Each structure stands twice: as structure tokens, then as C-alpha cells.
Amino acid sequence: MRENENMQRLQSQRCYLYGPFADTILMLRPFMKSPARFSAVFVLLFLLFGAFVCTRLLNSPILVDTSAEEPIITTRTSQKHPREIPLNCTAYDLARTCPSNYPTSTTITSHPEQDPDRPLPPTCPEYFRWIHEDLRPWAHTGITRDMIQRAKRTANFKLVIVNGKAYVEKYQKSFQTRDVFTMWGILQLLRRYPGQVPDLELMFDCVDWPVISSNDYSGPNATAPPPLFRYCGDDNSLDIVFPDWSFWGWAEINIKPWEVLLKDLEEGNKRKRWIDRAPYAYWKGNPSVAATRQDLLKCNVSDQQDWNARVYAQDWLRESSEGYKQSDLASQCVDRYKIYIEGSAWSVSDKYILACDSVTLIVKPRYYDFFTRSLMPVHHYWPIKDDDKCRSIKFAVDWGNSHKQKAQAIGKAASKLIQEELKMDYVYDYMFHLLNEYAKLLQFKPTIPQKAIELCSEAMACQAQGTEKKFMMESMVKGPAVSNPCTMPPPYGPASLFAVLRRNANSIKQVETWEKKYWENQSKQS
């Protein structure tokens, strides 16, 4: 019965979301995610489908792009929990079993309009629309258990949720405590929305770089890809992007849970006005993890050249021994410009840098995480060439120092997005909607594996020690949310998605044009 219902639902979703564009969108998915490849694809699509789309839109209301109106983002404020769930370590230490009295349902009505005293949930931020894109590879087929098992090859653990409870089957230990705090974050989601997260099974890989290559699953006879969750993706992969562990704290390098750190960063921004900050581009990190970071070190100031960059190699062993006195993120919002550059893959530092009111200089990235696809060049950040970093950074800083109001606006737009649209309320809501949409695709009834263990907050926090325990207690959800999750915005239609990619590509091209003229003028003057 469930399989029939799922297949009917999938067919209806296919008709509504993709219609005649389904196969084309799947084929061009890597191009659609990459602004650099957009122009050729855009022209090709309009030549092939222009007349057809116009006729179709006139005759069929279900393909009208409803995304023309931007969703309204309502600022959410902290509210008291109506029903706190205490952490009962005494009972857990005696029985070594998870409490049986965890709430498995919530009193929140599914029809908030019936309760005039309850605030209506806001519309989710724009980046939630990428959930539909990330799950698109399974829109036609659904997800079978066999597909999930094929993702086991690189997975660190398998997560199963049945009747609101979490179970984990562990395969291999992750680097540091990535797996621990990822699982902790999922448990907090269940505490926040008890009984609202559907039954599901998924595989999770805690390694940085994506592994599900889209080339391996393209073509008319290709099999469906294995669904694998991880922290980042790129234009050539099909991995499903999920919030990273650091939102609940990075114990090994003393980075606080995001809810705490976000407040610290907000206060840190107030210590020095943008105009009073150092007029240079700042970066501090571990250069040994990637050649591109080692290349960035060449942009540091020297006796021969000043590229307007001040870059520093981070020595985490020394920082640890000295109590992390020089790595307080909230104290680093003292430069007008901050550089973001990837490491072995994407870096968790993106959110800390963007939150600083400084102009974020993003060295052309290969990877994205769950929220960065909503960033707009020249609005939220300034794009930097990856193959000519030093000259690109110097131009960006000179431009910003010559256009101070515009530069300040870029920094403010980024920190506003982080403060308002990446608060933990929305991180949990992203997890909630992603898992709900994923569960709709499952073509089987999830069951608890024989080797799985039940997870609960007591099983993790009561046994933790030191910084791990501190961060778990600081990031623990106290009780069920007082409101429903935010309302999902509609998926991108072909026209709206191409408009986003075209806008971003054009903005980057404009910056490259300005930069080229800048250096031509510099050559003439010399």
C-alpha cells in the first residue's frame, strides 16, 4: 500500500515540479549549479525550448513560475519553551537505557490559523529552495533500501528514525568528533520537533569532499545514484548537503556552538566601526591542508610588494597549549576585509567570516554548503580569482577603500543574512524540511537494524567530558518549539533558477571587467 502511494505521489511531483523539463534539468544539473558554465547552457535552452515554453505556459497553469515574488523572511525571536525536557543522567547511569518518557508528539496545531494567539510561521529563507534541487536525482525513481545500502561504502554511520526515536549503526570513526556532534544535532532536532520528523533511513559521510560523481549516473541506461548525506557538494557531485557538526561546537579547536558564537560575533561587530577598521584583507588559517591556501601566503605584505593582504598561518597545537587566546573569532572582526578560501574542500569558517560586517572576499570556490548557494556576488561578498589571487585581492581592497559606502553595504548585507537567516531556528528548520522531503521519497518502511543502538541526549551528554560535555549542554534544545517550522518556499522553476545563475554570473563578470581596467590603468601609470 505504501509503495503504491509513494509511486503515485512521485508521479504527481514529477508532473508538477518538472513536467517536460525533467530529463533536461537532470542532464544539465551540474551546469545549473555553476555560474561559470551558465551562459552557454542558457542560450542553448532558450534556443531549444523558447517557443515550447511560451506556449506551454499559456495553456497550462501548473507550470507558471510562482517564484517571481521573493518570499518574505520574518525575523524570529527567542521564546520560552512551554515544556522543558530535562536531561536525566541519574536514571541513565543506573539503567544505561534511554528514557521511555521522551515526548513523541507536540501540541502545536498543524493549522496555526485556528489559534489566533500563535504566531504564523515565517517563510523559510531562499536557500531552502535548494532542498528540491539536491533531491531531484531521485524524483523519478524514489529511494529504495538497496540504493541506501550502496552508499555504505564510504559512510561513517547509518541513521534510522522510527516513531520519533533515533537509532545509529556505526561503520567507521570520523575525524575528531564530527560524527558525534552531527548525531547530537539530529537528536536536538528530535527534541525540538518531537513526533514531527518522519520514519527514515539514511547514510552519512563525515569526510569533507563529495564522492557521488554525477558522471557515474548519467545517460539513458544509468542507475539511480546512492543517496549519501554530507556537509558539502560541488557541481559534479550528487551528495545531499546537510548542516555541519560545528553548529553544535567544534570541541577540538574550542569553537563554540553556533547559537552562542553568533551572539558573540554580533557583540564583536560593535567593538569597532567598519570605517575605523584596518584597511586590509585579513586571513588566518591552516595553509597546509590545500595548495590554494599555500598560494595565498604569497599575497602577504613584503619589502617588495604590498597586495593589501595580511595573512597568517594558524598553529593549532600552539593555540591549544596557550588556551586559544589568539583564536577568539568574535575578536577578529577588526579588519575591513576578510578572506574566505577553501581548504581540502569547503570550510566551516564561511559563516564566521560572513558574520563580521567586513567585506568578505571569497576566492573562487569549488564547493558549497547548505546555505552558501544563496549568496550573491557584489551584494553579499566580493569574488576573488583563484588563479590570480594577489592582484585580485589588491584590486578588491583598493575598490572598497575608494567606495566606502558601497563596501560597507556589502559587509552589512552578509552579516544581516547570517544573523537573521542562519540562526539556529533556521538551521533546525532546514534539517527538518530536508529530512521530511527525503522521507517522502522512500519506497520502503524504515526498520531498526539489528546492530543499531538507540541514541538519546542522555546517552551522549551524560557520558561526555570536558569541552565536549560543555558544548553539548550549551547547544541542547531545552524542549519542543513553540511554533511550527518555517514554511518552505516553492521549488525553482526553470526560468527562476536560470535567472539566479545568470545574475550571479553577470555580477562576477562585471567585477572581472572592473579589475581588468584597473590593472590596465596601473600599467599605463607605471
Image (cartoon, rainbow, N blue to C red):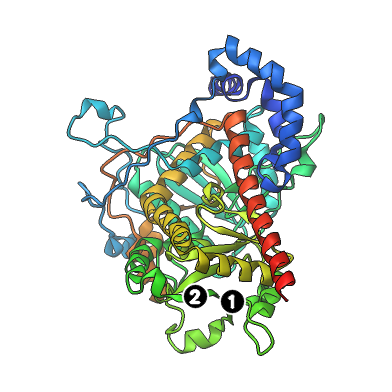
96 sits to left or right of 504: left
Marked residue nearer the N-terminal end (1 or 2): 2
| Amino acid of disc 1 | Asn
Give the image quarter of residue 331.
bottom left
Query: Which residue is rendered at x = 64% and y = 17% of the image?
Result: 54
Q: Quadrant of the N terminus?
A: top right
Give the image quarter of residue 40.
top right
Q: Position of residue 68 (x, y in %)?
A: 49, 29
Q: Which mark is residue 279?
A: 2
Q: Which mark is residue 342?
A: none
Residue sticking out furthest to the front: 525
Q: Position of residue 8 (x, y in %)?
A: 57, 18
Q: Which mark is residue 308?
A: 1
| Amino acid of disc 2 | Pro
Q: Is residue 465 visible?
A: no
Packing grade of label 2 (10 A; few <14, some 14-19, many >=20) is some
Q: Is residue 38 visible?
A: yes
190 sits to left or right of 77: right
Residue 427 against residue 180 in the figure, above or below = above
- Say whether marks 1 and 2 touch (CB < 8 Å): yes
Q: Quadrant of the C terminus?
A: bottom right
Residue 28 against residue 36 in the figure, above or below = above
Residue 382 against residue 506 in the figure, above or below = below
